[in-house]
Image (cartoon, grey):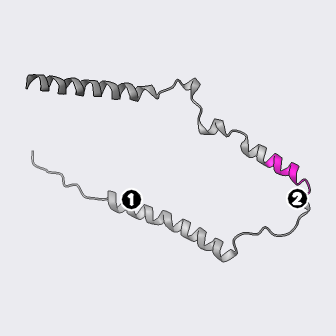
Amino acid sequence: MKMLKGNIILIVVLTVFSVSLWGCAGNLPEAQRVDYLNMNFGKSFESAQNNQILNPDADQNLEPVVGLDGQAAEYGVNKYKKSFEKEQEVKTSASTFDIMESTSN
């Protein structure tokens, strides 16, 4: 029975040690980190430049851009605006409550 308790304690200690070591292994120094912004820096400029190279006479095309019609776009914008109203109502109602303070000493 003593041997079983000793083994369990040893397993728990090793597990805690290995989990803590594993958690620290992912932390790289700031100089070695590559974040998303730096990986894609300049991509939009390169894309615009390539589009101008592919079609240098794009300013001559006066046809309207094909996309959403006015009613569909207005519906989408209104739905987007209403989504914020619902979130705000939920936040205020969920966080509003009364706290009764006791006046007795």
Q: Residue at x 9, y 23 (%)?
A: 2
Label 1 vs label 2, nearer the camera:
2
Mark 2, secondary structure of its residue: helix
For image coordinates 79% across by 49% down, the residue present is 48
- Secondary structure, mark 1, is helix
Where 68 falls versus 16 (above or below)? Answer: below
Judge whether residue 58 is colored magenta. Answer: yes
Query: Splitting the image into 4 quarters, where does residue 14 fall?
Result: top left
Which residue is label 2 attached to? 58
In which quadrant of the rendered image does the N terminus lie?
Answer: top left
Dividing the picture into quarters, in which one does residue 94 lie?
bottom left
Instruction: Examine the rendered structure and indicate whether residue 43 appears above or below residue 66.
Output: above
Neighbor class of circle 2 (other Cα within 10 Å; few <14, some 14-19, many 20+) is few
Q: Quadrant of the C terminus?
A: top left
Relative to 8, does residue 60 appear above or below in the rendering? Answer: below
Please state which amino acid type lies under the numbered disc 1: Lys
| Circle 2: residue type | Ala
CA distance for labels 1 and 2 = 47 Å
In front here: 105 or 96?
Answer: 96
Residue 46 x/y as whole percent: 78, 43
**Dominant secondary-structure state across the stretch colored magenta:** helix
Q: Marks 1 and 2: CB-CB under 8 Å?
A: no
Q: Position of residue 102 (x, y in %)?
A: 14, 51
> Residue 50 appears at what percent x and percent y?
82, 47
Segment colored magenta: 48-59
Q: Is residue 46 left or right of residue 34?
A: right
Q: Which mark is residue 91?
A: 1
Taking the spot 72% from the left edge, 43% from the top edge, the residue there is: 43
